[in-house]
């Protein structure tokens, strides 16, 4: 596709339910990030993939949060037993292959999934 | 908590005035990126700086990376209403990682 897509765009769920948020990165982009963004704040790093390998998951708040990218393309962020404090905008970003941390690394963000936990 | 701070948090300017936002990190950064987020939109990449003391220009926007690679600035000359939005800096706080920490952001409003 032309850009990063995320689905659903809006998700309302009841406390205790599980949710799965999907990210479809730009075709050919190797790196994929998940962020959480509260209103009026900057994106907060959750996790990062290179191809299908989860390189860093240190930003995941607790073990209710998990992410996968089994074929190195589409990724799913899953939140189990949702709580009201999980309500936020969840954003995905992708970038082309990085050879080093100082390499050019333009991140392309998707439109986000607005999660509301009642 | 946030380890990348930006000042000011908010800035209102008259159209045509200049604007500067400053980004300060608690640690040395291997590179720094700047993003713009329009109201209701998603962050859009503006630029990446890598070298100590680097200065880059994009039309009315001037970006600078500090000599110690712990701070950066974005200066907009003669603001326009299209410059409205929140500007974020971001960088990997730990050398060799891809974990980008975003700054607290500066929200710019331009009055016509």
Image (spheres, rainbow, N blue to C red):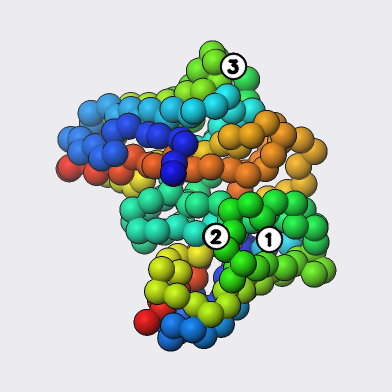
Foreground tag (3 vs 1): 3
Q: In this rendering, do the residues under marks 2 and 1 share a single chain?
A: yes
Residues at marks 2 and 1 touching, judged by CB atoms closer than 8 Å: no
Could you tell me if residue B56 is visible in this image? no
Residue under pointer 2: A61
Q: Chain of mark 1?
A: A
Q: Chain of mark 3?
A: B
B73 is higher (above) or lower (below) than B14? above
Q: Nearer the viewer, residue A90 or B56?
A: A90
Q: Nearer the viewer, residue A2 or B1?
A: B1
Residue name at image x 49 percent, y 43 percent: B102
Sequence-wise first label, 2 or 1: 1
Provide residue A77's location: percent of width, then percent of height. 62, 70
Provide residue A85's location: percent of width, then percent of height. 41, 68
The quarter of the rendered structure image containing the C terminus of chain A is bottom left
Within 10 angstroms of label 3, few (less than 14), some, or many (20 or more) residues? some
Residue name at image x 51 percent, y 23 percent: B70
Provide residue A43's location: percent of width, then percent of height. 48, 52
Provide residue B49's location: percent of width, then percent of height. 58, 28
Measured in 3D between alpha carbons, the distance from the residue under mark 3 to the one under mark 1, in whole angstroms, is 31 Å
Residue name at image x 33 percent, y 40 percent: B106
Foreground tag (3 vs 2): 2
Within the image, what quadrant is residue B53 found in? top right
Q: In this rendering, do the residues under marks 3 and 1 share a single chain?
A: no
Q: Secondary structure at mark 2?
A: loop
Q: Secondary structure at mark 1?
A: loop
Q: Secondary structure at mark 3?
A: loop
Q: Nearer the viewer, residue A103 or B84?
A: A103
Residue under pointer 1: A26
The disc at residue B52 is: 3
Q: Is residue B86 left or right of residue B26?
A: left
């Amino acid at each position: 596709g032309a850009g990063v897509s995320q689905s659903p765009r809006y998700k309302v769920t009841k406390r205790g339910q599980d949710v799965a948020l999907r990210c479809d990165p730009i075709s050919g982009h190797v790196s994929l990030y998940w962020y959480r963004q509260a209103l009026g704040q900057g994106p907060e790093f959750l996790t990062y993939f290179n191809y299908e390998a989860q390189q860093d998951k240190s930003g995941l708040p607790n073990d209710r949060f998990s992410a996968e990218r089994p074929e190195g393309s589409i990724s799913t962020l899953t939140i189990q037993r949702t709580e009201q404090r999980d309500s936020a905008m969840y954003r995905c970003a992708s970038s082309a292959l990085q050879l080093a941390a100082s390499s050019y690394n333009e991140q392309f963000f998707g439109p986000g999934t607005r999660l509301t936990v009642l | 908590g946030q380890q990348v701070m930006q000042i000011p948090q908010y800035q209102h300017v008259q159209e045509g005035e200049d604007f500067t936002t400053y980004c300060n990190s608690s640690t040395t950064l291997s590179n720094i990126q700047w993003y713009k987020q329009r109201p209701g939109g998603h962050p859009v990449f503006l630029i990446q700086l890598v070298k100590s003391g680097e200065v880059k220009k994009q039309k009315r926007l001037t970006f600078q990376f500090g000599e110690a690679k712990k701070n950066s600035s974005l200066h907009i000359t003669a603001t326009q209403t299209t410059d409205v939005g929140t500007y974020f800096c971001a960088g990997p706080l730990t050398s060799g990682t891809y974990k980008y920490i975003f700054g607290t952001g500066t929200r710019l409003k331009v009055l016509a």
